[in-house]
Amino acid sequence: MHRFFFLFTCMFFLTGCSDKEGQQKVQYQHNQCHRLTLLDEDKQLEVFGAEDIARLKSGNLLISAYDRRSKIKDGVPPTGGLYIVEQNDLSKTYLKVRSLIKQHEGGLRPHGIDALSNQNTHHIAFINRAYVNNKQTVQLVSLNIDDRGKIDKLKIYPIHCRANDIAIHQTKSHQGYIPFSYYVTRDRNACNGVGSVIENVFGLKKGAILHLQGEKTHLFADHLFFPNGIGFQHPDRPINKDNFLAVAQTRAKTLQYFYNANTFKKIPLTGGADNISIDRPGLVVAAIHKSLLKLALYRYQWLGFSTAPSHIIKITGNQKLNLFHDPTGEKFSAASIGVQTGKYLVIGSVGDKGLLVCSS
């Protein structure tokens, strides 16, 4: 039932938007991009729905994926995985991968993800949708991995049911690094049912940014309109006038830079931003959904929709540069993240197969 109301909301309030950005010059043409098909060796299944990507210090990529468009059995979606794709493999069209986490109670269905590297160790955190006794439980999962993918210090924290994306923060003091903390977007307040319908249909700004420090959760900012992707300009510095926390508000069609909880700058966009990545300090790469209706029809496979538009932009100050644009989704559908590493732009999707890799 909640899918029907989600589509109802999209149809009457979010049907589309101007495509002026998409008509401007695009850095990567379609003939400069190829699909990289990923095969999960353990499951012997191709990877779909690489919805978020985090770049490691080495330039390698951490992929968060599960197939959101596959058939749900007994009310439980199939599991996904966390995969590392090395930068040297991005020129390939086919790659075998293995999930970093093999077993996870309730299953692994990773959503938003982030990584912060210190020397040869990478701290990873992601939002996971686990199912225990056919009931969804949303978790914040953190762990350390080395360059070989060996896992250490895996921890699981309970988190709000509508947790969406995550940004890791760790600053230094005169005594060294302080413990990791996490900034999490909560896209709305109600988990499901009548509350979620009211929020969606009436466009209530019930989204928020949560700050998790150890076992404690604090409210950093609220009254946001479906906050989604999140990332720091400098994840190892305090939030201040020289270091913003960037947050995409999908339904507000804005990118918001927080310099503290009450001081921020809004950059208008021509569509709903999904996940974001920081290319270099101050340069934000964002996936833009021109029509949330088309995205919903593709995501839930209604009315025979098998594609949805893809658009990746880079924001530099107030300027927006087109990196990739596919208005039909025939090349690659429903792009949800774009990450630049080396000479490549790597794009993930809500539901399409593998990755799209572009190079000039």
Image (tube, rainbow, N blue to C red):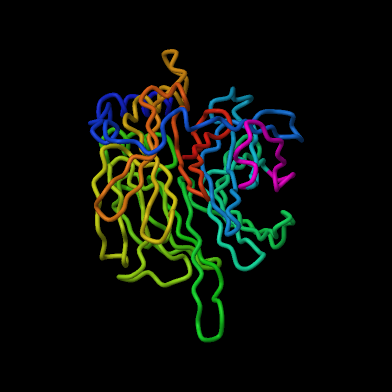
Residue 154 drawn above or below residue 30: below
**Rendered residue at 34%/30% (across/down):** 292
Task: Specify the farthest residue to the right.
Answer: 42
Q: Give the magenta-colored segment's residue range.
A: 87-105
**Rendered residue at 42%/48% (across/down):** 276
**Quadrant assignment, res 293:** top left
**Rendered residue at 42%/58% (across/down):** 280
Residue 242 drawn above or below residue 78: below
Q: Which is more toward the observer, 160 or 148?
A: 148
Image location (x, y in percent) of residue 335:
45, 34
Q: Main secondary structure of the magenta part?
A: loop
Image location (x, y in percent) of residue 96:
71, 36
Classify residue 99 as left or right of residue 7. right
Image location (x, y in percent) of residue 272:
32, 38
Image location (x, y in percent) of residue 319:
26, 49
Classify residue 233 as left or right of residue 67. left
**Quadrant assignment, res 131:** top right
**Rendered residue at 60%/40% (across/down):** 90
